């Protein structure tokens, strides 16, 4: 047994196997909710322990790349762990635990139907996420990218009503269409030009592609990675807000959108190469596209009264911070992109947890209804405030770090458009988040009546989960060493 765990390649296989084993055992306890959810929690904790062990070895300089499986000549299903993938796996495995705790309180507190299929699909989605994180080449990444779409579709349509079915169609059609029409051709074209699909530090396209073709390939990748929600390929994200809040948290923080921006950064670093793109000068348009998405999504968020929809458009904006940082094409901005993936994950999951807590305890969904809610739900709204400050980028919250590195990279390279975008969007972030905090704590709550019955906090698993993620948002500011080191290793700075 010691030998099994001593081999890092075996640990990689074990990490991939854990959520699939959980998905197999969960339905065996369909009639026993406590046992069913114990399986989920045990799997989540075990996965985190394995992933942390892998991270310690990657941080120590280990190269983890077990032999792949050739399915066709020149096409291999292969896994390897590089620093960016390690960071993504740490984020996903950590948040699976807190999301599972939260789901227990939310699904039971709201008497949600089909809870067993919910936990099964969630486990499969985590498996797909790890497959994306540990992909050793573009082919493997594409397969798991599609599996993530298919495994989360039942979660989006979980409620089973007409709104959920309509949102599910938008979700499935948009994500599958973009990946098949744009991402797959980009992958195949890359393989033909470079002679390999492997992820290689510094990229594989240098010397193989002229600048014009490189710009076309980059455009195919950006719009093929629909999960990154760069406008106009963003409609699926607000539409999917009809799903239960734990699903929204999965979409926005744990897996789906993170898979999108992770793939964008990974392709730029390991397929194109930062130096190659910068010298070619054909990726400058991406700065403007990402900047437009950041500002436009923030302006739309300002107009949303529904809390989850405001958070959804905030996510679209925050995702394009990562794309913008990657488009700046400096080592320090790429570090900022990686840091913001982690910061946004822990901050945005806190905000969605708080929204679900408010819905569960008070059955409120609109921002205009939240007067005084902080006096009745102080823990929930304190956590919300921490998450909101992080999204604005105010220290001592995790969101400050990513923005700091983005601004540093842009200013050092004298790229003033990203600087302007980040400054303006920060003001917009404050404009659509701080009024919610003000209403919650400084407006008087309505007198209890039939429409506004007296209430306190949501069930304790919900409160525990959002407290943990709020604490994590602060902790990541004071102790950023692991994600920062992995981000620097990604860029060869260590």
Image: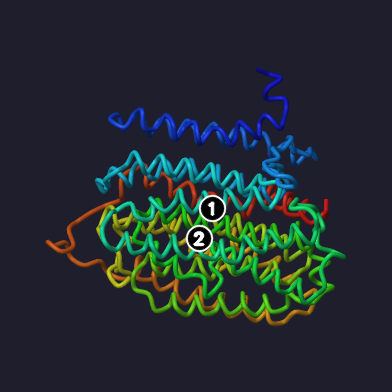
Q: Nearer the viewer, residue 439 or 492?
A: 492
Q: Nearer the viewer, residue 301 or 68?
A: 68
The local secondary structure at tag 1 comes to helix
Residue 337 x %, y %: 67, 62
Q: Residue furthest left?
A: 450
Circle 1 crowding by C-alpha within 10 Å: few under 14, some 14–19, many from 20:
some
Residue 3 x %, y %: 71, 20
Q: Are marks 1 and 2 in contact (CB under 8 Å)?
A: yes
Q: CA distance from mark 1 to mark 2?
A: 7 Å
Q: Is residue 247 left or right of residue 20?
A: left
Residue 91 x %, y %: 58, 48
- Screen quadrant of the N terminus: top right
Q: Is tag 1's residue or tag 2's residue first in the polypeptide sequence?
A: 1
Residue 470 x %, y %: 49, 52
The local secondary structure at tag 2 comes to helix
Q: Which residue is mark 2?
A: 176
Q: Which mark is residue 23?
A: none
Name the residue located 76 percent from the left edge and 71 percent from the top edge.
214
The image quadrant of residue 34 is: top left
The image quadrant of residue 405 is: bottom right
Q: Which mark is residue 146?
A: 1
Vertical position of residue 157 compared to residue 293: above or below = above
Q: Is residue 255 left or right of residue 324?
A: left
Vertical position of residue 434 compared to residue 482: above or below = below
Vertical position of residue 45 compared to residue 472: above or below = above
């Amino acid at each position: 047994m010691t030998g099994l765990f001593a081999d890092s390649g075996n640990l990689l296989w074990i990490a991939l196997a854990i959520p699939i084993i959980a998905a197999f055992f969960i339905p065996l306890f369909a009639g026993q909710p406590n046992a069913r959810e114990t399986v989920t929690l045990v799997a989540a904790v075990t996965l985190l322990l394995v992933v942390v062990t892998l991270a310690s070895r990657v941080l120590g300089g280990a190269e983890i790349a077990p032999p792949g499986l050739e399915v066709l000549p020149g096409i291999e299903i292969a896994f390897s762990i590089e620093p960016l993938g390690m960071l993504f796996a740490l984020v996903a495995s950590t948040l699976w635990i807190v999301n599972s705790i939260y789901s227990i309180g939310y699904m039971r507190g709201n008497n949600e139907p089909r809870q067993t299929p919910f936990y099964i699909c969630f486990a499969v989605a985590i498996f797909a996420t790890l497959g994306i994180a540990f992909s050793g080449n573009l082919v493997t990444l594409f397969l798991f990218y599609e599996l993530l779409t298919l495994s989360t579709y039942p979660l989006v349509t979980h409620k089973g009503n007409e709104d959920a079915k309509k949102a599910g169609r938008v979700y499935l059609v948009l994500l599958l269409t973009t990946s098949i029409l744009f991402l797959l051709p980009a992958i195949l074209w890359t393989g033909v030009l470079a002679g390999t699909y492997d992820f290689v530090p510094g990229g594989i396209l240098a010397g193989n592609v002229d600048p014009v073709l490189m710009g076309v390939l980059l455009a195919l990748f950006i719009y093929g990675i629909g999960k990154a929600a760069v406008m106009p390929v963003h409609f699926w994200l607000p539409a999917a807000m009809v799903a239960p809040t734990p699903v929204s948290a999965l979409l926005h923080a744990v897996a789906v959108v993170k898979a999108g921006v992770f793939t964008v950064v990974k392709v730029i670093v390991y397929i194109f190469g930062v130096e190659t793109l910068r010298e070619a000068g054909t990726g400058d348009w991406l700065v403007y596209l990402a900047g437009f998405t950041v500002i436009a999504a923030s302006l739309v968020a300002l107009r949303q009264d529904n809390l989850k929809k405001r958070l959804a458009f905030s996510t679209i904006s925050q995702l394009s911070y990562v794309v913008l940082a990657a488009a700046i094409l400096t080592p320090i901005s790429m570090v900022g992109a990686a840091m913001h993936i982690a910061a946004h994950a822990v901050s945005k999951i806190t905000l969605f947890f708080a929204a679900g807590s408010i819905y569960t305890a008070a059955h409120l969904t609109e921002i205009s209804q939240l007067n005084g809610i902080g006096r009745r739900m102080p823990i929930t709204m304190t956590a919300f405030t921490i998450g909101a400050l992080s999204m604005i980028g105010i220290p001592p919250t995790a969101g400050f770090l990513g923005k700091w590195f983005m601004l540093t990279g842009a200013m050092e390279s004298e790229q003033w458009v990203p600087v302007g975008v980040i400054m303006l969007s920060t003001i917009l972030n404050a404009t659509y988040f701080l009024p919610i905090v003000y209403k919650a704590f400084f407006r008087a709550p309505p007198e209890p009546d039939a429409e506004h019955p007296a209430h306190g906090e949501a069930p304790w698993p919900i409160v525990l989960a959002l407290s943990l993620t709020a604490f994590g948002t602060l902790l990541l500011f004071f102790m950023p060493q692991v994600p920062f080191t992995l981000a620097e290793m990604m860029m060869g700075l260590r």
